[in-house]
Image (cartoon, coloured by chain):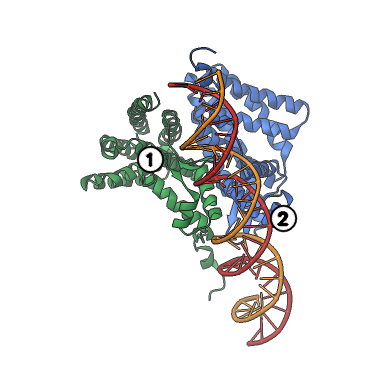
Chain colours: A blue, B green, C orange, D red
Amino acid sequence: MTATDDHIDRLPAPALVPATSQAERVADMLRTFVIDGELAPGVRLSEEKLSRKYRVSRNTLREAFRLLSRERLLVHHMHRGVFVARPTGDDVRDLFNARRALELPAVRGATEVAKDLVGAVGAAVDEGEAARAEEDWWRMGSANMRFHEALAALAGSVRINEFMRQVLAETRLVFHVMAAPKEFHDPYLPWNRRIHLALAAGDTQTAAEELTEYLATSERQLTTAFTEMERSAGD
Amino acid sequence: MTATDDHIDRLPAPALVPATSQAERVADMLRTFVIDGELAPGVRLSEEKLSRKYRVSRNTLREAFRLLSRERLLVHHMHRGVFVARPTGDDVRDLFNARRALELPAVRGATEVAKDLVGAVGAAVDEGEAARAEEDWWRMGSANMRFHEALAALAGSVRINEFMRQVLAETRLVFHVMAAPKEFHDPYLPWNRRIHLALAAGDTQTAAEELTEYLATSERQLTTAFTEMERSAGD
DNA sequence: ATTGCAGTATTGTTCAACAATCCAACGATG
DNA sequence: CATCGTTGGATTGTTGAACAATACTGCAAT
């Protein structure tokens, strides 16, 4: 042994050794189900059925529900149960406002930022194009989410990162409300490429302009589909 | 009765009639305790004692714990219990990064925003000065938080608003780690006034510059105090 | 068509029990 | 003296059952 214990200090922080609880595991599972669309927006999650299916007590299940409700993926109606969130047109507008507030400033300030953060943006684009080549539309959607996550990460705050992940998860719900996996992501891939190229070249101005258009176009596309949908549904 | 039911439609939305649950009430109470500093950072919250004191079952209490852990006000250590979060110097830096990312762009884009949002900013400043006149330092701190909350609200997203509230609540914890109520808020009041004046005049450029300085100064003040503190504590 | 009133199903909450784990104290060992 | 097992006690993790409170359904009455 050496005289000092410096090696110990270089080990990963204890927070990285999860030691996860049952409630968190269930929450993780449900979260992926919701994000993947296996649990459709609006469906009710019966405490009894779920607790029996996944062999956890109702109490533990309810702890998981609380976590996911705080993330807006589930909504809790008193004495009625928890439901998979069903975003409305107003939610879509709010989500895009939030994304503009997060992504645009992050891109604009990307000059004095570590290069590996920009690299992560490019990696997400690559991943998206690879998925597109294999016609794996689901993976393509994931890559697109990661792309925007990487943009927000340019701000350099883990809290912002977490919040952005949440916003994107909710955005994913929006896509599930109106089943349209391929056509919606398809035209945006080259846009992502252009944004990354501008970023890598240090041209944050162009990157921000492209992103602004991107978001406006995407929002318009979604909101029109939503208002159409809500008009026909809630006549 | 009239022929239509339009009056009904104008009533407040059902979400505003909370019908709150026990767990949420307990969470609300604990949240204010933490924010007000009645529960000091680092203290452990015993399930048994708290459940007996507030006449709720351990399970209900645990639901409340989950909510507050998600807000970073409490931290959950497996098999050890929940503790009031004790922010570190890294947390302080991250919090200020987040605030810069949220507040500065909101201020810069405040031109095409509703006037009442800017009005809310001014109201917070007034409140702060009124509190200062009465030497109510605690209320002054609250007003300062509301001021920054109002700044972030210029972005026009309820999700951003909620996130900002969370960030500010955590920031409040930082102040409790180092007990210094008055001296820390005191010099910032005139700064707030200048920022609001610039905003009201439509000079978002000046407002953003002032805010940038404000945040940098505040962060420097806190981080130096923190590193000093952590150096002496964890030698 | 609306209102009033069962009955039923589900959630809200509590309680008690046990398993799993951490922690502090003690002693053994080198 | 410092370090390392061991042991016992305290606290959390999780469960299952029970009961209360509430929402929903269907039907009868107006």
A7 vs A188: above or below:
above
Amino acid carrying label 2: it is Lys
Q: Which mark is residue A4?
A: none
**Label 2 crowd (10 A; few <14 / some 14-19 / many >=20):** few
Q: Chain of mark 2?
A: A
Image-quadrant location for residue A48:
bottom right
Q: Is residue A1 left or right of residue B191?
A: right
Amino acid carrying label 1: it is Arg
| Mark 1, secondary structure of its residue | helix
Q: Residue furthest right?
A: A134
Q: Is residue A99 left or right of residue B33?
A: right
Residue located 50% across and 17% down the image = A5
Q: Which residue is mark 2?
A: A49
Q: Residue A112 in the image: x percent, y percent?
A: 47, 19
Residue located 68% across and 42% down the image = A29
Which one is in front, A84 or B22?
B22
Q: Residue A118 in the image: x percent, y percent?
A: 57, 21
| Mark 2, secondary structure of its residue | helix
Q: Which residue is mark 1?
A: B172
State whether residue A220 appears in this view: no
Question: How many numbered marks, from 0 up?
Answer: 2
